[in-house]
Amino acid sequence: MLSHPADEVAPLLLGARLTGRGVAVRLTEVEAYLGATDPGSHAFRGITPRTRTMFGEPGHLYVYFSYGMHVCANIVCSPPGTASAVLLRAGEVVDGIERARERRLASRQDVDLARGPARLTRALGIVLGDDAAALGGDPFALELPGRPAPVAVGPRVGVSGAGGTDAFPLRFWIPGDPTVSAYRAATRRSVRPR
């Protein structure tokens, strides 16, 4: 199932159970990144040391540092050699809630424990060293839902430039779920003259 383009895999991941280091999350929001054809994808410009995992086997985590402060995780999909991945944006902690609370001390409500990509990775205990980890057992496992979840579709969160336009409706979420993160359009950064 994971050996398909990210925009096909992403909606099928909604409702899936992802387990990591004593915590399980039901995925409620994801974003698809299509590699060489997608200006919003890290792999748009080809293989680099950072993106090598995206070009690898499906069913592995692509983990990276974002904005110099957050760890984010994607599930690699598509056949090897074709970069495609699904960003894990949000979920509901369904098992191991005490451990998730310990990892996310700043959360005031349980609904916020995995609401957002950096919060989700923190709740699951995903760190940079987990890049290329398989989702086949220990410490991470993915269990697909028995039946498809309802799906809403829209533009990705915070992606600027050509990859963030409405031409890329690659964000998928379970409508009405309280753990889905708030949508924020990208803000363009101005370049200051030197």
Image: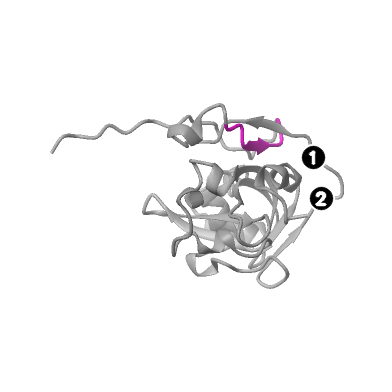
Are discs 2 and 1 less than 8 Å apart at CB?
A: yes
Could you tell me which residue is drawn at 50 percent across and 70 percent down?
Answer: 129
Where residue 61 appears, as percent x and y from the top left, is: 60, 61
| Quarter of the C terminus within the rendering | top left
Q: Is residue 13 visible?
A: yes
**Coordinates of residue 190 in the picture (x, y in percent):** 27, 31
Would you say 96 lies left or right of 158 here? right
What's the residue type where badge 1 is placed?
A: Ala
Looking at this rendering, what residue extends furthest in the top direction?
166
**x then y, percent, for residue 31:** 60, 42
124 left or right of 141 in image: left
Seen from the viewer's position, the closer of residues 118 and 60 is: 60
Residue 116 visible in the current orientation: no
Residue identified by numbered label 1: 149
Q: Residue at x 54, y 31 (%)?
A: 183
On residue 64, which mark appears? none
Bin the neighbour count of mark 1 within 10 Å (Cα to Cα): few under 14, some 14-19, many 20 and up: some
- Label 2 sits on residue: 145
Task: State how far apart marks 2 and 1 are (Cα).
Answer: 8 Å
The N terminus - image quarter: bottom right
Q: Residues within 10 Å of mark 2 (few under 14, many from 20)?
A: some
Residue type for callout 2: Pro
Q: Is residue 26 above or below residue 191?
A: below
Q: Main secondary structure of the magenta part?
A: loop
Read off the magenta span: 168-175
Q: In the image shown, does 99 or 62 lie closer to the viewer?
A: 62
Magenta stretch contains residue 76: no
